[in-house]
Image (cartoon, coloured by chain):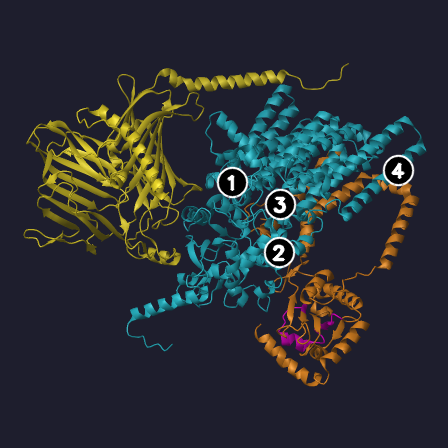
Amino acid sequence: MDQSVNDSEPLQQPAPPRGSTNHQITAIMSADSLERLAVAGKGDSTRTLLRVIILLLIAGAAISSRLFSVIRFESIIHEFDPWFNFRATKYLVANGFYKFWDWFDDRTWHPLGRVTGGTLYPGLMVTSGVIYHALRALSIPVDIRNVCVLLAPAFSGLTAYAAYLLTNEMTPSSSAGLLAAIFMGIAPGYISRSVAGSYDNEAIAIFLLVFTFYLWIKALKLGSMLWGALCALFYGYMVASWGGYAFITCLLPLHAFVLICMGRYSTRLYVSYTSWYALGTLASMQIPFVGFLPVKTSEHMPALGIFGFLQLLAFLDYVRSAIPSRQFQTFLWVFAGSVFGIGLTGLVIATSAGYIAPWGGRFYSLWDTGYAKIHIPIIASVSEHQPTAWPAFFFDLNMLIWLLPAGIYLCYQKLADEHVFVIVYALFGSYFAGVMVRLMLTLTPVVCVAAAIALSTILDTYLKAKSPIPEEHLVEEPTDGTSKKVSKPGLRASSKPYIGIYATFSKVTVAGAMTAYLLMFVAHCTWVTSNAYSSPSVVLASRMPDGSQHIIDDYREAYQWLRQNTKDDAKIMSWWDYGYQIGGMADRPTLVDNNTWNNTHIATVGKAMASREEVSYPIMRQHEVDYILVVFGGLLGYSGDDINKFLWMVRIAEGIWPDEVKEREFFTPRGEYRVDAGATDTMKNSLMYKMSYHNYNNLFPPGQAQDRVRGVRLPDDGGPVLNSIEEAFTSENWIIRIYKVKDLDNLGRDHASASAFERGQKKKKVIKKKGPRVLRVD
Amino acid sequence: MKTSAVFSAVLSLLSLASTSSAHGHHHHHHKHSDSGTSSASVPPAFTPPQVFKNVNLVHIVSLEKNYVKESINVVIENIDKEAQSDYILPFTNEQLSRLGGLEVRDRKNAESGPFIVEPVKIELFGPNQYVRVRLPTPLAAGAQQTLGITYYLLSAYKPLPATIKQEEQQFLSYSFSAYCPSVYTTSKQKTEVKFASTNIPDYTKLPGSGDIKEFPQKQGSKLVYGPFDEKPAGALEPVQVRFEFNKPLIHVSHLERDIEISHWGGNVAFEERYDLEHRGANLSSLFNRVKWQQSQYYNPVTHALKEMKFPLRVGSADPYYTDVIGNVSTSRFRSNKREALLEIKPRYPLFGGWKYPFTIGWNSDAKNFLRKTATGGFVLNVPFLEGPKQAEGVEYEQVVVRLILPEGAENVKWTTGIPKSSISEAGVQIHKTFLDTIGRTALVIKGRNLVDDFRDRDLTVTYDYPLSAVLRKPIVVFSSAMTVFVSLWLLSLINLKFTPKK
Amino acid sequence: MRWLPALLSASLFAAGSFAAKKSSEERFAEFHAKQTSHAPVKLTDVSFKSLTTAPRDYSVAVILTALDARYGCQLCREFQPEWELLSKSWVKGDKSAESRLVFGSLDFGDGRETFMGFGLQTAPVLFFFPPTAGPHAAASPEPIRYDFTNGPVPAEMMHSWLVRHLDGRPHPPVKRPVDYLKWAVSFTMITGSLTGVYVLWPYVVPVIQNRNVWAAFTLIAILLFTSGHMFNQIRKVPYVANNPRGGVSYFAAGFQNQYGMETQVVAALYGILSFAAISLAVKVPRIADPRSQVITVWAWSGIILVVYSFLLSVFRVKNAGYPFYLPPFM
């Protein structure tokens, strides 16, 4: 999982887009120029050559547009989850595959540990491991980090190619594929998860997704077992790579089901589906993390159900072909339908009876959108599980978002099996993307395909060199009876016969406009990528007054300090967002991390953070915590800090200890969430609050202490006092603050009195220094 | 039962002694057969023959840097019947492990190179070790010669107090002998101790002699013990000094320095990996950022390490500064006609007991270092040691210099200005990297206990690089690429389709 | 918050003075009688005071709510039926009143003083008064408070919350009554529709098989989803909002949120744009008359330009510093 939501997201500062734009423009332009050439009709080989060159250019554009972060910052792993994947990859490379397969990691989830080998999707690590060893074999001494950083861009090139293949299955127009490829290559919706350094499962999963779909369509069209098997193979790879494989697992049966309902059952469907399902399921069950889920959980039931239903249909089909009789047929269809219904009810019963596991929380929350918020705050708390506001769609897809419906409409024109697939995919893809921001990723491919279909149709129409002659059409117009009959199954729009564009001027207008929009699209993508998606959130960039870039590197400063100056097995307690980073960069054991498999453990940390010291200290002792790490943006105005995430800690803790942690008590009677003088006592006494603001107001002249995130002035009462922990390190800009958990007092006092005693001593000393004014009556 | 245990322990000890000492002795025989102690399996303790006398000795202990530099200027006289060529220096076992850069020269004629210096490999368990200085020309009976002996002692100080506050000053203590340790009678000697500052709170006082009533005499930032009158061989007078040293104690426990020469690129690439730690007084209370930030307004002298300056050779280019978790942005590089100065800051200020390993690297044009000889060979001349130039000095416990020559470079020979006594081992290895087939020739030299005084000492390497080796790589790459294409073409001819038979 | 109990007890003294003549036993009998007839007991300031006066050997769970429409408390109205269901099923489930729990609901209209007394700024709030006497007497008389910070809660969750504070006493479960009417209605509906389908089958088939219908359906759905309709569903955003300057703002400031109307506008823009694209791609090349064709081409191109430029300007409102724009909406 990614990081928690914080109530105020930072808005990207605009900066002039630079670098690598021209690549993309050339690619687009050449895509257009291909139309002309294609229309002009050179030799077949010339076209192939052109196509290859253009595809290469597109791949180049796709890759280069993802290198902003490397150019601007460095070759570094981004954000949160990638740090775990990186660590796992290093482990794989160091210890070999089998050790990796049964890797028990005792440096996370202390003291529980984690059966990492069995609870991750190994596809990503194995892929980069293989690449690494291959390069080594060629005696190219590449650093594993660079392999990981550049994996996503490399695969994005492949994704573009896969989109090209998929689209070519949809339409005869040769330009559509190339357009889809370039769209796929530079659409921010995909770039957001595949810039250099974002070394996450999605990096390879999207390629696998698109390619699997391509193979599925291919198999369906040819009814070929070979393609079906290939499809299953890549499906297996997909399962090994990303939890999102469930999307395929549900979409393909859905497609099959729709086809059946449209009365398009065919042996092609039968062959392709059965071969895919049988082999694919076997393949997927090889992954330890998946294991027997494909036959146990509801997510996978549709696939199984359709599989059974297809067998039935095949049988009936055979019988029908044997006994041609009207009534018999109808009877058979009724029979089939009823069997399907019975099967469905049976499934429901089995689920309710508990033979089949009900929908998993994260998956279920896609349907019952209110579910997570009430029952699983840990899922609701993740920023990428939030619903999508419309600007996000436009931000990530720009003009494609309004080309999508057009493309879908065109799919309705000649409604072949593959078009049905695109329609179904688009429908469900857009639904899921609307429910969860992160699923924008699964929507993007179909948007690119559909948009490419629409745009290529337009361009093909308006870039045809030869114009029709008006007269003949005019005469045949009235006596045009054929089209009526033809139009029966088709769409109204396409009922009339196709003529073409007469005026060159209108051709120029439309073609010119479209080209302009395309260029703008390219500019948009570049701008979005460079501004929104290219910052490795580990390193923050700020602009100096003179416009020069200033790097704020507090995270790594603190992690490096931990790594070098604490003992090797010092347990670090922090909110789960930073678990993976601490594991990866500081190389120290953590209590909780972004693999949020144990809600109770996270709630424990939440409780420790949200309670008074006297409550937290025993908890931390029990978990052998040596250091506590908090993120505090108050000095810099960095809004992604722990105080902004604090409410989630409270909620999650409240879910387990409703009587000890109460969210209400962190709100003022007027229901405000305050950190200044008006904050509630519970807030002021909570460990998190104390750790964030401890010693902070000494940085300012008296009474001037200010929190630049919450934009409030802090009370001038010497700041919170810590007894059972002490400040160990604070990064340059105060973003990371590390505290050391004190050992038990040697005199057996409780920490409060002990440190009170200490302070008393200090005060006396000070007064002694001051001189005669010691007449204090205590 | 107890006794038996002890006994067995002693036995094992002895056996160990015999074996290794036998080996040691054997070795020793090869070198020169004249000093023929009996070749028994358990040798008697080595007693240096009393053939010399230190007529006059000045011992200068310099505590100005974060390592100790001791230099002994001594006039020796041969008091034996026949000519002698072996002058023996005593060190304690523990000293020897921290001793580096031992050099002995003739004071009279400076241009004569350093004498051969080698440890006497006989004593194994004794507290004392001996080092033999071989005079190039044996000293005739009754003749005199002036030796200049210099050496360095690493990690020599003890911070006192051991823990201090962030803003407090750091004091170090060092103990040594007021009489210069020698295996010979010393007629006249004195010991000067130099400090970085005049603040020397306490030091051992000795009863004076002659018109001086008390040693030492304090002259500014300098203490002088002596002059003392005649002392017998092995006479010691332990003294301790405690002095202010408010600078970081930079200790590089391990330095790997890679120098890669590319003839194709005409480039020399340097990379240095430091394991750096601060051996000074630890913090008594944990790091306090507020205090630190406030103190930084008026930039005071502090015992924390904030910055390091690497003066590189002029013409060095595109430097980088990284650590385990990636690039470190806090560095500046000033490069122009006159200088190429790399200034780096650690991610966090380094206090006593804190570590900060990091890596720096840079490129330089090959013609600054490499030249072709008349005979077609190549001569490479690089500094053995670069690295930070700090006022307080830097000490290196272990240094590994890897000189990676191009693939196929032959008969490698090398010389260096670093004292031989500090080179622990050297050899030629194979290093496989970018598209190598047989791997590159790598000269690996390991040094120990070096200090930044040796920054300017050169490492000169000569090697041959035949044309065949030059052309190997392009040929290999080209041919392999061809094979790939051809095989691909062949594969494309195979038809995988299932075609239904007509 | 600290001064609350003090004030509370102060206010309770007043009540206590006249409520004192009734013993806690009698009061419970009285209120239990009420709630057996109709749970939860509808309280007023006075009855609330007498009910919650210490000493009491019974527990009280009161919802302080504001059901009247003019307070516009959506949450109150959503929770009320759940609360009634819970109290009813509890009282039914525990006829002999072993749990000694009284359910009450106090509306703001009847209980202003009480609201004042607690210094409540928000509604609904649920107070649980533990017994101060008897076997389950709690340490402090002050009530335990439940805030609906996570929106409306089902009766079951509220039940479990109560159960946590009522250990050692019977906890009759929540019984959702079977709504026979609903069942009957739905049954008749289904059968009716089935028969209807059967009868109208020949007429239904063309509709089902009509691509235009399906196309329209799909496109509308997609437009809804891609214009953030699900966000509205989940976050329950307002349709429009009043901006501080008194006017009405149709577009929410900020990238992360939106208003209902906003999304409809956007959906419409998308719809127009894609329809224009479709016409350019499909309709125009089928126009036989050159003149009208040229005109339509221009028309559609113009529409695309204008609408797209408007869309961009709207987007610039959402994302300050978005550099791109098209004429005419600069």
Pointers 1 and 4 within a single chain: yes
**Residue C316 image offset from top left, x and y in percent:** 58, 50
Residues tagged 3 and 2 counted as in contact (Cβ below 8 A): no
In the image, is residue A163 above or below residue C75?
above
Estimate the spatial distance between the alpha carbons at disc 4 and disc 3, rounded to whole Å: 42 Å
| Chain C representation colour | orange
**Circle on res. A438:** 3
The amino acid sitting under disc 2 is: Ala
SS category of the residue bearing label 2: loop
Estimate the spatial distance between the alpha carbons at disc 3 and disc 1, rounded to whole Å: 23 Å
Looking at the rendered structure, the number of numbered marks drawn on it comes to 4
In the image, is residue B165 above or below residue A422?
below
Can residue A7 be seen from the camera position used here? no
Residue that numbered label 1 is attached to: A87
**Residue A450 image offset from top left, x and y in percent:** 68, 37
Q: Is residue A685 left or right of residue B379?
A: right
The chain painted yellow is B
Residue B201's quadrant in the figure?
bottom left
The residues colored magenta run: C98-126
Q: Is residue C92 left or right of residue A123?
A: right
